[in-house]
Amino acid sequence: MAKPFVRYYVGDIVKMKKTHPCGSDTWEVKRIGTDFSIVCQGCGRQVLIARPKFEKNVKKLLSRQANVEKEPQVKPET
Ligand SMILES: [Zn+2]
């Protein structure tokens, strides 16, 4: 069963399968690349995690900044 492809953005708040030692399981995405940089919402600790590991560990996307899905409003000059 194929999982639908999910694109993540900086600013996304995600719930992870694994709980951080501080007790929080929500993280904010800070940087996206080969490795994702995520910040624990419980204690503020920043962690680097490889993309496949991140995608595997995300349980749920909790919130997303409203503006990320919008296309940049760039009009070509003619
Ligand atoms: Zn924590």
Image (cartoon, rainbow, N blue to C red):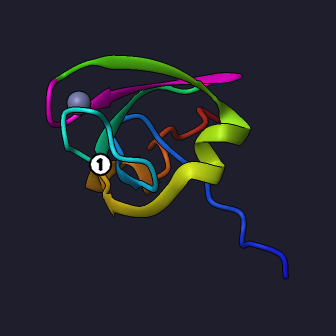
Horizontally, residue 25 falls left or right of residue 57, namely: left
Residue drawn at (19%, 33%), measured in percent from left and top? 22
The 10 Å Cα crowd at callout 1, few under 14, some 14 to 19, many 20 or more, is: some
Relative height, residue 26 to residue 34 (above, below): below
Is residue 36 on the magenta stretch? yes
x and y, in percent, of residue 6 in the image: 63, 60
Horizontally, residue 7 falls left or right of residue 26, namely: right
Relative height, residue 52 to residue 62 (above, below): above
The image quadrant where one finds ligand 1 is: top left
x and y, in percent, of residue 9 in the image: 47, 41
x and y, in percent, of residue 55 in the image: 63, 49
Does label 1 point to a residue whose CB lies under 8 Å from ligand 1? no
Q: Quadrant of residue 47?
A: top left
Which residue position holds label 1?
Answer: 25
Horizontally, residue 7 falls left or right of residue 10, namely: right
Is residue 20 on the magenta stretch? no
Q: Nearer the viewer, residue 28 or 47?
A: 47
Q: Which residues are magenta?
A: 33-43
Q: How many marks?
A: 1
Which residue is situated farthest in the bottom direction here? 1
Residue drawn at (31%, 27%), measured in percent from left and top? 39
Which residue is situated farthest in the front direction here? 21
Q: Nearer the viewer, residue 8 or 1?
A: 1
Q: Provide the secondary structure element on which disc 1 rests.
A: loop
Relative height, residue 18 to residue 4 (above, below): above
Q: Nearer the viewer, residue 21 or 39?
A: 21
Residue drawn at (85%, 82%), measured in percent from left and top? 1
Kind of residue sitting beneath label 1: Asp
Which residue is situated farthest in the right direction here? 1
x and y, in percent, of residue 61 in the image: 40, 61
The C terminus lies in which quarter of the figure? top right
Relative height, residue 56 to residue 48 (above, below): below
